[in-house]
Image: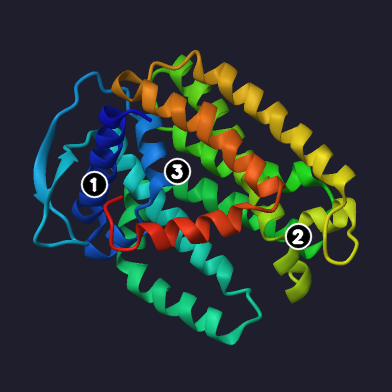
Amino acid sequence: MKVREYQQFRAAYCGLCHCLKDRCGLAARFVVNFDCTCMAMLLSASECFESSCRRCIAKPFCRRDSYRGDAAFGAAADFSVILAYFKLKDSLQDDRFFARVRSRLLMLLLNGAYKKAKNNAPAFHSAAEKNLLALSELERKSCASMDASADCFARILAAAAEEEKNPQRKRILEQIFYHIGRIVYILDAVDDFEDDIKNENYNVLSYRFGYTDGKLSEASIEEIALTLELSEDRLYTAFELLDAGIWTSILRNILFEGLPAVSTLVLNGEWRNMRKKQREKMNGADI
């Protein structure tokens, strides 16, 4: 990513953080992340980059360039809070006592923001709730269909396009978000596989492929890689039809270079170690 693109991405990240506070309250700012920022940029078709220097909650004595935001960033803020709340709710199924306690405390902290986001984006909330219930039912039945499980999560992200007024752009965004959601679900299942087997948690890949010594076979990994490539191809085809305005080059870098790189690291079992090293390196540094 070029320096100018990185600076714009950081400004978008900061802009979304401020948007979260303005729409859903101070606690909502803690759900901001790179994935939410990517969602906001995909929803936005802005042709003009307007920013201002604003104080950063992480570093109160610093001022950072912050994108002023638009309606798309507001929608992404609501979606991000709803997704974060449901993720915490899902974590209550964790068998570990302290993990459940942590999730309950964070849900209490985020409850006010969640209610505001739910009120702001009722259609997205309804879609998320409906598909998460469907996913929970598949888990209860020990579903062995990777496609069925991934479809539930993919439909949640696809619902982010519901408020788009332009029918053609809406269809394009639905395809993009659907396949991003499908890829994310499958990669998470691969990344969490060994932990899920160890903790006896549901993981669709264990029912679909089986395992030896708590690990997937090379043949299973190859089949997973193939289905990920199919989703990536459809994602790229849809993206070529999207007018993403000022965010086009940044999103192209993320989707066409970053996403395949992450997929390779996850499938090779290298993603967790790399992520840990990145967190250590970025601790105390700028995003």
Crowding around mark 1 (Cα neighbors within 10 Å: few <14, some 14 to 19, many 20+) is: many
Q: Is residue 278 left or right of residue 111?
A: right
| 65 w.r.t. 235: above or below | below
What residue type is disc 3 on? Ala
Identify the residue at horizontal 50%, vertical 49% (top origin): 126
Q: Secondary structure at mark 2?
A: loop
Disc with the residue nearer the chain's start (1 vs 2):
1
Label 1 sits on residue? 14
Label 2 sits on residue? 203
Disc with the residue nearer the chain's start (2 vs 3):
3
Distance CA(mark 1)–CA(mark 2): 35 Å
Identify the residue at horizontal 51%, vertical 56% (top origin): 275
Is residue 79 in view from this perspective? yes
Q: In front here: 3 or 5?
A: 3
Q: Quadrant of residue 118?
A: bottom left
Q: In front here: 51 or 204?
A: 51
Judge depth for marks 2 and 3 and give the one in front. Answer: 2
Coloring basis for residues: rainbow
Question: How far across and down, in percent of the image, does residue 173 sit?
Answer: 49, 26
Q: Is residue 153 left or right of residue 53?
A: right
Q: Secondary structure at mark 1?
A: helix
Label 3 sits on residue? 123
Mark 1 and mark 2 in contact? Answer it, CB < 8 Å: no
What residue type is disc 1 on? Cys
Q: Is residue 152 left or right of residue 21?
A: right
Q: Quadrant of residue 166?
A: top left
Crowding around mark 2 (Cα neighbors within 10 Å: few <14, some 14 to 19, many 20+) is: many
Distance CA(mark 2)–CA(mark 3): 28 Å
Q: Quadrant of residue 36?
A: top left
Distance CA(mark 3)–CA(mark 1): 26 Å
Disc with the residue nearer the chain's start (3 vs 1):
1
Crowding around mark 3 (Cα neighbors within 10 Å: few <14, some 14 to 19, many 20+) is: some
